[in-house]
Image (cartoon, rainbow, N blue to C red):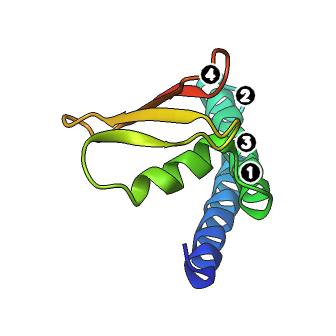
């Protein structure tokens, strides 16, 4: 992502976080705020806002090994291949599922990086 795209992404996440918190407050002040359904909605919105906050912190710090692998894979043509493992520098095999575009990957080193989207 370019710096401008990162800034726009962070602004969008922050806006979503603020809207979730505002919606939670609106539900808390309703007449039926004590009902279980309303309390569950408030908890869900607060959780969404907390997750967005964590995402914001994650965008400002160093990328995780899986994020670095995804960045390398994005530049690769085809539906499968090998890239250097961002954790141990061994070979990481990856494949893109043709039905949904999800990427699966596994390092050759036992116990190293492995994921399934």
| Identity of the residue drawn at 61% across and 73% down | 6
* Image coords of residue 47 (percent x, y): 71, 38
Q: Is residue 37 above or below residue 58?
A: above
Quarter of the image for the C terminus: give it: top left
* Image coords of residue 11 (percent x, y): 64, 73
Q: Earlier in the sequence, mark 2 or mark 4?
A: 2
Quarter of image, res 59: bottom right
Mark 3 or mark 1: which is in front? Answer: 3
Asked if residue 31 can be seen in this view, the reply is: no
Q: Earlier in the sequence, mark 3 or mark 1?
A: 1
| Identity of the residue drawn at 69% across and 65% down | 14
Q: Which residue is mark 2?
A: 34
Outermost residue toward the top in this view: 110
Gap between marks 2 and 3 measured at Cα: 16 Å
| Identity of the residue drawn at 65% across and 40% down | 89
User: Which numbered circle lies on residue 109?
Assistant: 4
Q: Which residue is mark 3?
A: 46
Closer-to-camera residue (95/53):
95
Q: Are marks 2 and 3 in contact (CB under 8 Å)?
A: no
| Identity of the residue drawn at 24% across and 48% down | 78
Gap between marks 3 and 1 measured at Cα: 9 Å
Mark 3 or mark 4: which is in front? Answer: 4
Mark 1: secondary structure: helix
User: Which numbered circle lies on residue 25?
Assistant: 1
Mark 2 or mark 4: which is in front? Answer: 4
* Image coords of residue 53 (percent x, y): 76, 53
Assess disc 3: are there few (<14), some (14-19) or many (≥20) residues with their C-alpha within 10 Å of its C-alpha: some
Assess disc 2: are there few (<14), some (14-19) or many (≥20) residues with their C-alpha within 10 Å of its C-alpha: few
Mark 1 or mark 2: which is in front? Answer: 1
Gap between marks 3 and 4 measured at Cα: 39 Å
* Image coords of residue 75 (percent x, y): 40, 60
Q: Is residue 9 above or below residue 107?
A: below
């Amino acid at each position: 992502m370019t710096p401008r795209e990162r800034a726009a992404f962070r602004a969008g996440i922050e806006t979503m976080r603020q809207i979730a918190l505002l919606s939670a407050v609106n539900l808390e002040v309703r007449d039926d705020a004590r009902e279980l359904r309303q309390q569950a909605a408030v908890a869900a919105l607060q959780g969404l806002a907390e997750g967005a906050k964590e995402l914001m912190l994650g965008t400002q710090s160093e990328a995780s090994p899986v994020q670095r692998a995804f960045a390398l894979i994005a530049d690769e043509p085809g539906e499968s291949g090998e890239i250097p493992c961002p954790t141990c520098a061994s070979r990481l095999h990856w494949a893109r599922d043709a039905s949904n575009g999800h990427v699966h990957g596994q390092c050759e080193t036992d116990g190293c990086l492995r994921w399934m989207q």
